[in-house]
Image: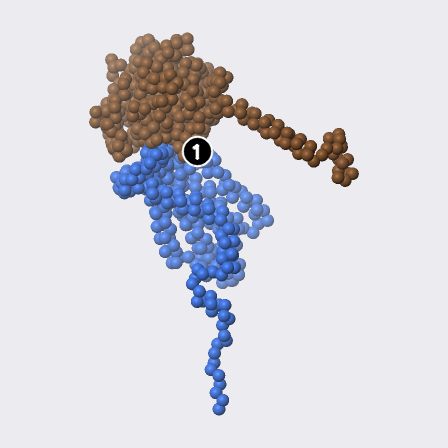
Chain colours: A brown, B blue
Amino acid sequence: MTDSRKDVQTTLFGKTITRRRLVQTAAVAGAAASTAFHAPAVLGQEKAKVTFWTTHTDVGFDSLKTITDMFNAQSQDATVEIVQRPAADVEDSSGLITAVRGGSGPDVYLLDRFIVAERAGQGLLQDISSLASDNGLDPSLDGVYIAFASAEAHFNDGLFALPFDTDLRALYYNKKLLTDAGIDLEAWDPKNGVLTWDAVKEAAAKLDVKDGDSFSTVGFVPYYNQGWHYTYGFSWGGEFFDYDKCEVTPDNPKVLEAMQWVYDYTKGEGADAMYAFIQGAMRPGAPPNESPWNQNRLAINLTGDWEIANIPKYNPDLDYGITYLPVPTDGMDSTTWAGGWSMVIPQGAKEPEAAFKFMQYACGADGQRQYTKDTSHIPTLLEVQKDKTLYDERHLFFIDELLATAKNRPPLPVGAKYWAEMTSAWEKIYLNLADPATAMGEAKKNTQADLDSGGFCPIAKPAS
Amino acid sequence: MNTLPPLTTPAEPTAPATAARRRPWSLTRNERKNLGLGLLFISPWLVGFFAFLLYPIYYTVRLSFTRYGGFGEPVWIGLDNYKRFWTDGLFHTSLWNTLYYTGLAVPIGVVVAMVLALAMNQPLPEIPIYRTILYLPSVLPLFAISFIFWALLDPNKGVVNEFLRLLGFSPPNWFGEVAYAKIALVGLAQFGAGQAALIFLAGLKGIPQHLYEASMIDGAGAWSRFRNITVPLMTPVILYDLILGLSLGLQVFTQSYIITRGGPANSTTFIVYYLYNNAFKFGGQMGYASAIAVFLFVLTFLIAIVVFQTSSRWVNYDLT
């Protein structure tokens, strides 16, 4: 060894070391480093990492984030990471399908419950019946979740989702605008019964304000927000599926009557002018502050229970009331409809067991209680639904008065197709581009073709 | 008399003679080495071509004969997906919408690109600034342009309708009326004309100046020079733009997806948008979506052939 190298060694180690000593030191250091690097990995393996995707935004996403944090704080088995995916139409599963095919899908996905059967039918979702049994949950969900939500979570006798929330539609009205137009609010108080659709039409006509050919304020837009084909069809007493014939029935006479009312309504108002007024707010992804309802330019709004949580944020000074969905003729019972979301495990999930534990928590008492408080939606878990301390007076109206009158969309393996076809027909009807029978006839033909070619019939009628 | 030796062509070198006798694919060691090296150098492209173009096309064609939801085993159903074209009303609507859009957007696009290129070609000292301004919309993503266009054409507060009202017109609801929605999207497509304009500009630069000078001496005016010199000599560029435009026009999707969601009343449901809905919204329709994709591929191919076949009548390659 040269003098200079000796000097360096002495400087570094304090004394001269042999080659053997150097190798031994390196080996020990290497082993120690290896242990150090492996230690966190071993510790990390104790908790499974679960990825949870949702397209929810705003209040809904914030609440889901809170639920995820609550789960992580108490879970010994898993850590959940919530990922906000770009919002799209609820029936658009392109992001999920491509990710799962590419092997990078999530462990848990929040899916609109009415298309669970369709996604299960195409093989995208895992049957979670055995996971439910292993974790002490009866896969039938009988007596645990509200019946229609449970029905929507099943497909071909398998359990493919856990129900999360549900929601109900009602008629909201801006008290100041109605009062200013000289409308007596007494009739709008739900204590005084149910309005007729014609009474709403009559009031709305007094609320319209025009600036030249275009509207600056509109009384009521029947197809805005939750004004859907299903809303009016159910209200008129129509049915959308015939289980005996395994046939979609958008041409049911009652449904067509309802569609005709909407057709006549927009024709009377001027279909193009009304659409020009509302079109911007109907754009997918339009911010809530662009809604004429939040700008006090729309007096009557057909929307859901979640509006109670949104109003303080987007129109805090609004003085509003909520009443039943109107009826076509006096004396009929008011009918609303319920939707809602669910949690599913897609194919290819890396941590299905841990994912199910998270689902069970989020769709269980703690998760549903938190979501109800944050978003003013309605729990599907019967045990939580009974807890009246979760609701304020307005919210209680939905639970006490509307829930029992709620119908739901038929859970079909062509649910998304049916929705899209009817929505296309619906658009033609309210824009006065086609008469209801023609438009709905086309929707029926196209949807039935998929139902027949898919070999899905017969379809068992879900327990109500 | 001495006989002259017979006239012969100089003896050919032996190597080419051997090469001529060789089979076309029998290469020498050096040639094989060069071929190997060449393939190695283009291998990234080859891998991309086979893995991301050829194989997906093959897979799509195969799926088009099946019923398939994207998962599990596809079920062979023969030509059923193709037979469905005859009875599917929305397929007919989407095909008509696509042809209508392409038929308008592509020729208008050629005219707009030509006008922009002529503007960019002016001999002005500040022309780089104008070129940048004219090209700028082309570098914006299509979804951003879609939002801008939505705001411009808003029926109530949009600048375009406000301007038309000032002029005393009663403007339409561009994206809200069946009669105008496609036309509005054709207008939006012109925001991307800057790309084509650059190619047109390169074409204009390639036209010899002496042709213009000679015609001016002969007394030709600006219009005459444009019609008789510029347009004929730009036809190869126009052909290129036409083929590219047709291909892109037939694949129109983003604008419809972002602004109109196929509406109103399916008036902007284009064929790719319909394909997308079948693939990703409706369960079990990936096979039908594949059949639509194959149909679009064949349609584009046929239209391109027709354009090429007719191009010999109007494309002038004399100076290129």
* Residue closest to the far right: A3
On-image quarter of the C terminus of chain A: top left
Residue B149, horizontal then vertical, whole percent: 45, 36
Q: Is residue A47 above or below residue B76?
A: above
Q: Circle 1 sits in a helix, a strand or a loop, which is it?
A: loop
* Residue closest to the far bottom: B1
On-image quarter of the N terminus of chain A: top right
Image point (38%, 51%), residue name: B304
Q: Quadrant of residue B72?
A: top left
Residue A286 visible from this viewpoint: no
Residue B227, horizontal then vertical, whole percent: 44, 56
**Is B169 on the left-hand or right-hand side of A262?**
right
Q: How many marks?
A: 1
Q: In the image shown, does A328 or A184 lie closer to the viewer?
A: A328
Q: Amino acid at mark 1?
A: Gly
Q: Which residue is mark 1?
A: A103
Q: Quadrant of residue A379?
A: top left
Residue B197, horizontal then vertical, whole percent: 49, 48
Image point (49%, 89%), residue name: B2
Q: In the image shown, does B244 or A145 lie closer to the viewer?
A: A145
Residue B169, horizontal then vertical, whole percent: 40, 36
Image point (35%, 50%), residue name: B302
